[in-house]
């Protein structure tokens, strides 16, 4: 029996929502789209990425540049990223019980490694 658990990083291991939300709203003037309100998030999450782009009013041609800027701004704030409460214990218990642990994410390897190292959790197999 293979015992492997794969985690997403943003929103599963790391509490990055508020930071990404703030960065995205901060860049709205520069990139020409409307800011989101926190009370709209549940509705926005139901939309496809293309629907979010269309609803925001950003030009589809600006999206790659926006994503690059979001990543750059996120990198500047990486020290402010924390893991969800209790996740350390869960990961350590899984590892102790012989599970292989992996992460799949759209975030950069450098960011993930920095946060995991900060919490002494460089225990992932892949």
Image (cartoon, rainbow, N blue to C red):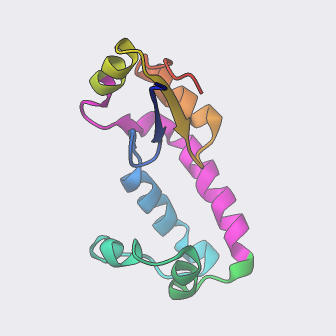
Q: Position of residue 38 (x, y in %)?
A: 30, 70
Write down the region rendered in magenta.
Answer: 62-88
Residue furthest right as drawn: 61
**Residue 87 is a magenta residue:** yes
The residue depicted at 43 percent of the width and 21 percent of the height is: 99
Check the image and report above or below for 34 versus 70: below
The residue depicted at 54 percent of the width and 48 percent of the height is: 74
Check the image and report above or below for 79 versus 48: above
**In the rendered view, does 8 fall on the left or right side of 109?**
left
Say which of 94 and 20 sits in front: 94
Residue furthest top as drawn: 96
In terms of secondary structure, what is the magenta stretch mainly?
helix
**Which quarter of the rendering shows the C terminus?**
top right
The residue depicted at 41 percent of the width and 48 percent of the height is: 16
Q: Position of residue 87 (x, y in %)?
A: 31, 31
* Image label count: 0
**In the rendered view, does 106 fall on the left or right side of 83?**
right
Q: Position of residue 10 (x, y in %)?
A: 45, 47
Which corner quadrant of the image does residue 120 belong to? Answer: top left
Say which of 122 and 58 sits in front: 122
Check the image and report above or below for 79 versus 22: above
**In the rendered view, does 59 fall on the left or right side of 29?**
right
Which corner quadrant of the image does residue 68 belong to? Answer: bottom right
The residue depicted at 39 percent of the width and 38 percent of the height is: 13
Check the image and report above or below for 92 versus 19: above
Q: Position of residue 6 (x, y in %)?
A: 48, 37
Say which of 83 and 74 sits in front: 83
């Amino acid at each position: 029996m293979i015992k492997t658990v794969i985690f997403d990083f943003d929103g599963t291991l790391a509490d990055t929502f508020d930071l990404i939300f703030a960065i995205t709203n901060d860049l709205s003037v520069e990139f020409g789209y409307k800011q989101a309100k926190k009370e709209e998030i549940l509705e926005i999450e139901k939309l496809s990425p293309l629907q979010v782009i269309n609803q925001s009013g950003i030009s589809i041609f600006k999206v790659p540049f926006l994503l690059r800027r979001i990543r750059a701004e996120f990198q500047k704030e990486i020290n402010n990223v924390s893991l969800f409460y209790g996740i350390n214990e869960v990961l350590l218990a899984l590892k102790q019980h012989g599970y292989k642990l992996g992460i799949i994410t759209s975030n950069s390897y450098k960011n993930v490694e920095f946060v995991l190292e900060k919490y002494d959790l460089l225990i992932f197999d892949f």
